[in-house]
Image (cartoon, rainbow, N blue to C red):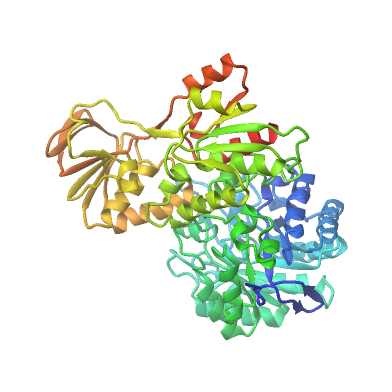
Amino acid sequence: MAFDNLFSPIKIRGLELKNRVVFPAMGTKMATEEGYVTQQLIDYHVARALGGCGLNFTEVCGVHGPSNPAKFLAIHDDKYIPGLKALADAIHAAGGKAGVQLWQGGMAAASYQQGGIIIPSDIQVPGTDYVIPGASIETIKEVVKSFGEAARRAVEAGYDCVEFHAGHNYSPHAFLSPAFNKRTDEYGGSLENRARYLLECIRAIRENIPEDMPLFMRIVAHDDYLENGLTIEEMIAFCKMAREAGVDVLNVSRGNFSTAALKYEVPPVDLPRGFNVANAERIRKETGMITIAVGRINDPAQADEIIASGKADMVVIGRAQLADPDFCNKAREGRTEDIVKCVGCNQGCYDGFVSPEMPHITCLRNPALGREAEYALSKTDKPKKVLIAGGGVAGLEAALTLKKRGHHPILCEASDSLGGQFKLAGMAPRKEEMRDAAIAMGEMAKRENVDIRLSTPVSPELIDEVKPDEVILAIGSEPIIPNIPGINLPHVTNSHDVLAGRATASGNVVVVGGGLVGLEVAEHLAEGNNSITVVEMLDEVAKDLGYLRKICVMESLYMKGIKTITGAKCVEIKENAVVIEKDNKTEEIPCDAVVIAVGAKSRSTDELVEYCKAHNIPCHIIGDAVRARRALNATAEAAAVARAV
């Protein structure tokens, strides 16, 4: 398939793009503390430009010094021009076009600093007497001027276009939305007044860029989860005003960080692919403007259809190009089966962004993300035979990386199929893409001619037979089965067996364990019209889920009527009830079946480690075989070990 629509050129004012793919970088944490561009960020962008992307945007780049948070890219001073120019030059040298996303974060800055928060109206901080004041007229004028000056700097730094970020609860969106804007002056009230700040910013930007430079604008299609929020009709009316002020292209997103609508900003696997395209289609039709669709677009055929059918003129493909920076080149060359697809897990990108423990974002499917230069694959001059025990994502990542480097991996899997726990996780509701990804990873290993041996557990005897130069143990984990009375009763099973289809549970079902796996098996069973109760020892369920996936899972539990009991310990299982201890009291929950989902433990590697040690064979343990954790950890460790061999 040629994807002729996706890879057709488009001209916007003086900007000619070789294709219709936009990459909006999630590179904020790759800036310095002061907001300067780093070499790491340049490498990150260049990888996508070399991958064939039409237009690369920086992520949010702060235009206003007093309100720009630490570690966010900055363009509010001339001192940032050299670094930004180095980034633009590198993108151009790699064959791409470059744009700057001009940003004033509004309440987003509150998470990173105490002062300089630009909002339309007073907001009292919950649980305190502190009120964040609405912006004064003087501050509004100052920020408007800052947008114009930032646009001038983008031109001096050599960028091909700029984008005005007017969405996601940032100050422009907050001024436009009646849910946030309670002002009674010329910047509040009617749509025309609420739009005034944004239109002044647009005009300031337009006045500071050449006539032939396109001005993009990122918007939300409408407000979600907000009382008295923006309607799509109001957004369409505003976009027509913005067109008259000088905006050329609409980048139609969705979501805000004040409510559960945050899930739409970096949509997890729980949301349908292309969930926001219909909104982009309507806005395009009613404004007559060049329009970009965004939201879980992770397949070239999907992207091509959006453009071919007239739903949008361009597509934003963000996380899909984090998972595979060569996404566009592979699609153009017809190698779609080799595309490593984003599965919307959010473990490395969004969770990595908000985690103070992670220095930059990463990706479950692409451990080289953010380390492109450091992790560039190098061919070995000393090929080794490497025996890999375990055909889950850790073992497969290690095998593929070793093979590409010129080694000879032998991948042994005890079961009759590849994919491991990641494939099993794909049996849970809304996670089919994870199952498909695990299967695709196995198929890729076959195409790379990795020596794969199924139904072959690794033993000392096998090691002796194969005589490997090194051994990698990726044998994963197994369910924890607690030692409580009644655990061996016939109506008791475990989450892994239920998801794998090896066991069933019906009627009134008690799931013991309210972590990710427990909730997934609860949802799975609820689809069969069973009555489900989840018992969790901790003070809340879903504590091991990332924030955006947690929003979706908790909403699903509510919609399916799944009951949760927290702070409760299962102390006994009877033939027709589960006995729990909560608040120093015991009570019984009637049930027909019990599913144990209290976690997983590493499978023992002791025997194999001792054998390798005794025979002087270097041995590496990776993934859940070290400790049961996320798949993100498994692929990261596999990538590191396979590059070190």
Pinpoint residue 589: horizontal percent, then vertical percent.
Answer: 16, 40
The reply to whether residue 545 is visible in this rendering is no
Residue at x 27%, y 54% (from the top left corner): 526
Pinpoint residue 490: horizontal percent, then vertical percent.
Answer: 17, 37
Q: Residue furthest front?
A: 465
Pinpoint residue 146: horizontal percent, then vertical percent.
Answer: 76, 62
- In the rendered view, does 448 fall on the left or right side of 458? right
Of residues 562 and 125, the one drawn nearer to the viewer in this rendering? 562
The reply to whether residue 103 is visible in this rendering is yes
3 to 353, vertically: above or below: below
Image quadrant holding the N terminus, namely bottom right
Of residues 527 and 76, the one drawn nearer to the viewer in this rendering? 527
**How many tags in the picture?**
0
Image quadrant holding the C terminus, namely top right
Q: Residue furthest left?
A: 576
- In the rendered view, does 264 fall on the left or right side of 200? left
Pinpoint residue 34: horizontal percent, then vertical percent.
Answer: 75, 44
Residue at x 39%, y 33% (from the top left corner): 478
- In the rendered view, does 454 fall on the left or right side of 483? right
Of residues 332 and 410, the one drawn nearer to the viewer in this rendering? 410
447 to 295, vertically: above or below: above
Tell me the quarter of the picture where residue 253 sits: bottom right
617 to 518, vertically: above or below: above
Tell me the quarter of the picture where residue 6 sits: bottom right
- In the rendered view, does 335 fall on the left or right side of 183? right
